Amino acid sequence: LMPLRYVLKNRPRALWATCNLRDETLAQCKAFFKKFLPLLGVEPRIMRSTEDSILSITDGSQPKSRYVCSSKGAAGLGMLTDHGLKTHGWDKPDYEYSHNTGRGPVFNSFRNFMMRNVGLDPMKSVSTEPPYIITVSPASSKDPDRRHVFNAQIDALKKAFGAGNDDKSEVIIRTVVFKSYSVAEQVKLASESAVIVGACGGGAVTNMFLPKGSGMVLYYPDKPKGRMHNYPARLDWDYFNNQGYIRVHWLPVSSMNSANDLDLLVKLVKNEIETISHH
């Protein structure tokens, strides 16, 4: 596998949310590439970048050709873009059609490929026996609309299931700030979970590594702040709703701490556990 990235020099035409959209995103991408390359089976220490299409060999040997030759090859963006030409779910037109209908098997295959690259078994389904691990993911975004600590939600879940945190407990409620862990550790933590509770957005991408038959609860800004957006933002809904191997539930941020919504959260998680136990 040789990942290639085409750099679009014309900045106004750069694809939304790509590295070349802004100068600051380009700088951030360098750090992201280093962090996430293991998922593609590439060690960051041996990764090289070049703007030249001519083959360069770094082990001292002489190349037999100036170019990379292969009997088979594929080029392009592929189908694993989470929203196509839409904008994640910020605006009303983003909900007029689904970009990822029928792509669940491909998403699952790509997930399995990445898990194998970090030494984990992707074929394990969610455990139908206790303990059931409920992972709450706070502080997953820098955006004020999605930066939540979930204290009320954690208290409600512990009240409903108990505060057990060992293998003798039927349900374990744990809090995980995913960004504090390496990529391999994040994947492992997600793959051990029966349910993940968190905010939508980029920080929820780790949820793709939940085991088959598990569930997630995503809080979305139903009244987003700012001049650019004024529509309920179920970010990346098109991707999550079409994964196929994970159940997803969406809850609004504006009423997330109300008694009714806390009760709804508990009932959703209870239903998930019941569904998993009869899987």
Image (cartoon, rainbow, N blue to C red):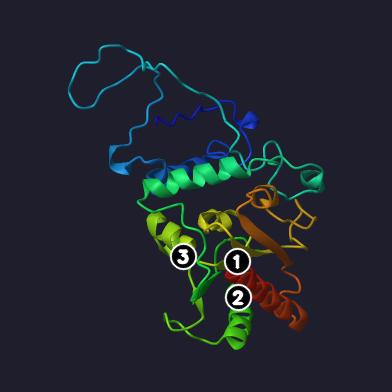
Q: Between residues 264 and 148, which one lies in front from this camera angle?
A: 264
Contact between marks 1 and 3 (CB within 8 A): the answer is no
The residue positioned 75% from the left and 83% from the top of the image is 259
Q: Looking at the figure, which quarter contains the C terminus?
A: bottom right
Asked which secondary structure carries label 3, the reply is loop
- Identify the amino acid type marked 1: Gly
Residue 264 lies in quadrant: bottom right
Contact between marks 2 and 1 (CB within 8 A): the answer is yes
Q: Between residues 26 and 267, which one lies in front from this camera angle?
A: 267
Res. 24 in view = no
Q: Which residue is mark 1?
A: 198
* Residue reaching furthest to the top: 65
Relative image position of residue 188 (x, y in whole percent): 42, 60
Indicate which label's residue lies in the foreground, 3 or 2. Answer: 3
Asked which secondary structure carries label 2, the reply is loop
Mark 1 surroundings within 10 Å by alpha-carbon count, few (fewer than 14), some (14 through 19), many (20 or more): many
The residues tagged by marks 1 and 3 sit, at their Cα atoms, a distance apart of 16 Å
Contact between marks 3 and 2 (CB within 8 A): the answer is no
- Identify the amino acid type marked 3: Glu
The residue positioned 60% from the left and 53% from the top of the image is 245
Establish if 186 lies above or below 93. Answer: below
- Identify the amino acid type marked 2: Phe
The residues tagged by marks 3 and 2 sit, at their Cα atoms, a distance apart of 20 Å
For this view, does 10 lie left or right of residue 125? right
Mark 3 surroundings within 10 Å by alpha-carbon count, few (fewer than 14), some (14 through 19), many (20 or more): many
Residue 219 lies in quadrant: bottom right
Q: Which residue is mark 3?
A: 192
Q: Which residue is mark 2?
A: 150
The residues tagged by marks 2 and 1 sit, at their Cα atoms, a distance apart of 8 Å
Q: Between residues 14 and 154, which one lies in front from this camera angle?
A: 154
Earlier sequence position, callout 3 versus callout 2: 2
